[in-house]
Every structure is written in C-alpha cells, then in structure tokens.
C-alpha cells in the first residue's frame, strides 16, 4: 500500500498559509500560532502535511507534462496553460497560464515553508524529529526556488515570512538564488535520514536535487560526486517494470526508484491525469519524438536494418509503446473509437489502460514523480563524461537504464562527443513527458536549433519560436504591478 503523509487532507493547507491567491495578502498563522496552534509535536506534523500539500499545485504535479509540449517531444492540442502560445514564442508579462502559475504557486509553497520554519524553531519537541522536519521543509523550499531560478533566473529571495511592504524588494541575482538553494539542501542532507524514500523526502532526495542543481550549472565534478553518493547508498534501484512505475498499481509497493514525488491517495486526494491525458489527450507526442526511439539493435531507424516503414513500431525500443499510444486505440484490450489527434499519437505513460471508458468520474491517485534513480544514473553519466570522459562507469550507468527494458549496451569505444549525444538521447527517451526536456534543452544551449526544425501542426517547420530572451520567462504583470522594485526581464 502506498505510504502517504497526506493523511489529514488538503484542508490542512489553510492552517499553514494564506488561502488567497496572493501569498502576501494575509497570513492566518501569524495569529493562530500564538493562540491555538504550534503547541505540540502533532501540530508540527499537521503543518508539515500542509507544506507537502503545496506540491499538488497543478503545474508542479499533474500537468507537469505540459513542459514537454514546449519542446520537440509534445504538442498541446488545447493550449492549456497557454502552452501552445508559449511554444510559438508568444511570451509577454501578460501571457498568464503556466508563466503565472509556475511563479505564483512556487511562492505560495515558499510562504508555507517560511511560516513552518519560523514557528517550529521555538517549539518544544523531540529534537531528532524537529531536525528531520526542518530538513524536509528546507528541501521543499529549495525545490520551489530551483524551479523559479530555472524558469525566471533572478528572483526575489524570501527567507522568512515578509509583511506586504517588506516583500517589495528587488530580485536577487541568479547566483544568489543558487547559493540559497545549496544552503537549504546542505542543511537537508545533514538532517535527513539515509533510508528509502516512502513519501517524506530523505537524504537521497536532497543529494539528487543538489546534484541536479550543479548539473544545470555545468558543475560536473560536484554533480558526479553527489550522484555517486546516491548510487552507493544502497537505498535505491531501478524498478523492474517501466510501465508500472507510472501507475498506481505499480507504485503500491513504493518502488525504490522513486526519490521524490507529489503524493496522492484515493478516495479523497485524487487528480485528473487520466482525464487530461487518457481522455482529452492534451499532450500529443510529436513525430520527432517517435522517430528518436531506436530499433532493438540499438541503432537509429535511419541506420537499422530492422526498421520497416510499413510496420514502423515493430522491433523498436520497448519504451516507445510504453510511452506513446499509436492507432488503433485500445482500453482494457478492447479497440475504442476516438477522434484522431493532431499528431496521430497519444501519451501512454501514466495512463491506466485497464480503466475505460474514461469519463469525469475516472480520477487517479498516481503519484507524480519528480526525481528517480534512472535520472540519477543519467545525471551521473553526463557529469562524469563531461568531467573525465567516457570511462567504464559512464557506460555502466547508461547501460543500466537501457537494460531495464532490454535495450543493448552502448557501443564500446565511444568518443566524449558521441557519448554526450548518446546520453542526451537517453534522457529524451527515458524521461519523456516527465517535465525534463525543456530545461535540458535550455541548459545544453540547443533549444533554438532543436525547435527550429520541428514540424508544428498547422504551421509547419519553423512554427516554434524560441528567442534568446526566452531563456528567462518574464515576471507576471501582476507581480510587477504589486512590487514596483522589480526589474522586468530583458526583452519583455
């Protein structure tokens, strides 16, 4: 059975931070904490649940797949969260959608973290438990700030709950934000237990996130060392069922592969992933992604003698059909009639094909995975290859991911450049529709070249438009209006 800390219900969030849209409008804990709350260890646990609940914001959980629709992986048919417009370069402070949600929901989460950390400091409780709770919350705060730094660059740092007037300050530099993130993660690593992840973040969660922060900064030696610690911990491994990893039924046993996720639990704490993806087909996989999957001999479809254009999905990397649905559509073994999609494909990853027909009553408590061991192995391979070169440990890490689905090892004798390309392809395939591709392309500096050759439905090649100033999204116009000290991003 899924171990889930969210046992008190999402209503607890109201006790931990503002229930208004703006996290600075009011803060009920300022008053409650001194009168009826924050009196016992159980109060701290309830507040901790509230902090974790902030991870259920849609853009940080259920609709994270939309980030792949900003890339050559996917196309959002309904322009949900303004993703279609953003992918085509229509990005303004007033765009709204994911640009507003990513910003506002992060600061709501940070506000909850700051309120928690302020109030637990003087609480009389078991010191080991207190230290762990503080470590968990600092990890979550670091997670939100890392997302802000990745999408917006320079942002405001709030280390304690500010008043409305105190919140009107200039943004810190991107490097200052990174330093703040590393400080929180160092504290988390020091206080979190070295055990398997069961829903509350653990030491490996923090090591993996810190490694990712270094990786995205091009700090290869540090990233390799941190991922190496996770690999040597003995508390994580690849789950033997790639499909099941993204289904509630597979997650029931708490696979050791998962290092950090947004948790859900039926019947009261569910989401619409099956509806968004399995029924509405909001994300459509692009042909560019389909063509990226190798044949089972480990060669690209351009080179493999096994590839047959008349039967294009035969003898392909098993992850192709574990990630992407191709026509005809099947539910529970029965062919079903659904409208064709814009690209001719639907997402399979995370869609339970034993449930059907999908309707508004088909809710899911599948956990949304943010960090997992396969990502750690590929981060290690990338960092070690860049720092040292394609030594045997690099081959071993990538091959471990490939062997899970029966794909052959990488060829021996690869150059550093060839290994780099192999790792980048492996990340695209292994992590498709998990929200990594957009940030990977940005940090590699390849996003403009990659998107320029994508065939956009209705527009053709060149329909996607990523300009140099799009590396950082603009501050939402509502935030500029609220905080006149902010300097809007260059280009907006």
Image (cartoon, rainbow, N blue to C red):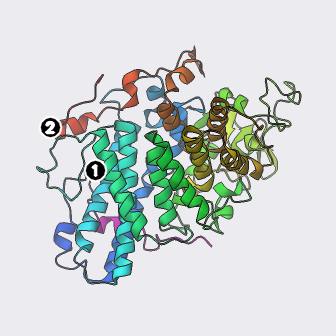
Residue 93 screen position, x and y as percent: 30, 30
Principal SS element in the magenta part?
A: loop
Question: What kind of element bears circle 2?
Answer: loop
**Considering depth in this image, is 80 or 173 the residue closer to the camera?**
173
Check disc 2 and report the residue beneath it.
485
Check disc 1 and report the residue beneath it.
21
Residue 68 - label: none
**Considering depth in this image, is 208 or 435 the residue closer to the camera?**
208
Is 273 displayed left or right of 188 in the figure?
right
Q: Is residue 243 visible?
A: yes
- The structure residue drawn at horizontal position 54% and vertical position 30%, both measured from the top left corner, is 71
Q: Quadrant of residue 252?
A: bottom right
- The structure residue drawn at horizontal position 25% and vertical position 79%, both measured from the top left corner, is 123
Q: Which residues are magenta?
A: 1-16
Residue 218 screen position, x and y as percent: 46, 39
Q: Quadrant of residue 68?
A: top right
How much space separates mark 2 and mark 1, taking CA atoms? 21 Å
């Amino acid at each position: 059975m899924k171990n889930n800390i969210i046992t008190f219900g999402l209503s607890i969030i109201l006790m931990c931070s503002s229930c208004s849209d703006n996290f600075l409008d009011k803060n009920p804990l300022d008053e409650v904490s001194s009168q009826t709350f924050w009196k016992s260890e159980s109060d701290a646990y309830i507040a901790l649940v509230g902090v974790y609940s902030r991870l259920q914001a849609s853009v940080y959980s259920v609709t994270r797949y939309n980030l792949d629709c900003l890339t050559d992986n996917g196309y959002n048919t309904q322009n949900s969260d303004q993703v279609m417009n953003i992918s085509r370069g229509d990005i303004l402070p007033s765009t709204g959608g994911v640009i507003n949600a990513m910003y506002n929901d992060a600061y709501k989460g940070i506000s909850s973290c700051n309120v928690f950390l302020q109030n637990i400091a003087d609480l009389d409780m078991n010191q080991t438990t207190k230290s762990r709770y503080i470590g968990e919350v600092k990890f979550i705060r670091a997670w939100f700030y890392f997302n802000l730094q990745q999408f917006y660059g320079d942002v405001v740092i709030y280390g304690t709950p500010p008043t409305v007037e105190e919140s009107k300050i200039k943004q810190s530099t991107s490097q200052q934000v990174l330093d703040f993130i590393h400080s929180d993660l160092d504290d988390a690593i020091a206080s979190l237990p070295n055990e398997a992840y069961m829903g509350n973040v653990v030491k490996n969660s923090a090591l993996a996130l810190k490694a990712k922060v270094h990786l995205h900064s091009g700090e290869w030696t540090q990233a390799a060392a941190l991922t190496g610690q996770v690999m040597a911990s003995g508390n994580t491994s690849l789950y033997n069922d790639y499909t099941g990893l993204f289904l509630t039924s597979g997650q029931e046993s708490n696979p050791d592969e998962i290092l950090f996720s947004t948790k859900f639990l039926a019947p009261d704490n569910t989401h619409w992933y099956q509806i968004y993806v399995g029924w509405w087909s909001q994300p459509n996989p692009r042909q560019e992604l389909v063509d990226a999957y190798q044949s089972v001999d480990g060669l690209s479809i351009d080179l493999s003698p096994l590839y047959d254009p008349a039967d294009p999905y035969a003898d392909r990397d098993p992850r192709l059909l574990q990630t992407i649905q191709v026509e005809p559509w099947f539910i529970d073994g029965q062919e079903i009639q659904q409208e064709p999609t814009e690209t001719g494909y639907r997402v399979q990853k995370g869609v339970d094909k034993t449930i059907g027909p999908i309707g508004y009553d088909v809710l899911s408590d599948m956990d949304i995975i943010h960090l997992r061991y396969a990502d750690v192995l590929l981060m290690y391979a990338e960092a070690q290859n860049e720092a040292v070169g394609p030594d045997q440990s690099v081959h071993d890490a990538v091959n471990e991911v490939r062997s899970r689905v029966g794909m052959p090892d990488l060829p021996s004798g690869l150059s550093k450049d060839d290994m780099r390309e192999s790792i980048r392809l492996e990340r695209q395939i292994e992590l498709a529709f998990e929200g990594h591709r957009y940030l990977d392309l940005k940090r590699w500096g390849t996003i403009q070249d990659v998107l320029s050759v994508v065939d956009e439905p209705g527009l053709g090649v060149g329909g996607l438009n990523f300009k140099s100033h799009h590396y950082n999204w603009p501050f939402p116009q509502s935030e500029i209006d609220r905080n006149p000290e902010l300097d809007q991003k260059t280009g907006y």
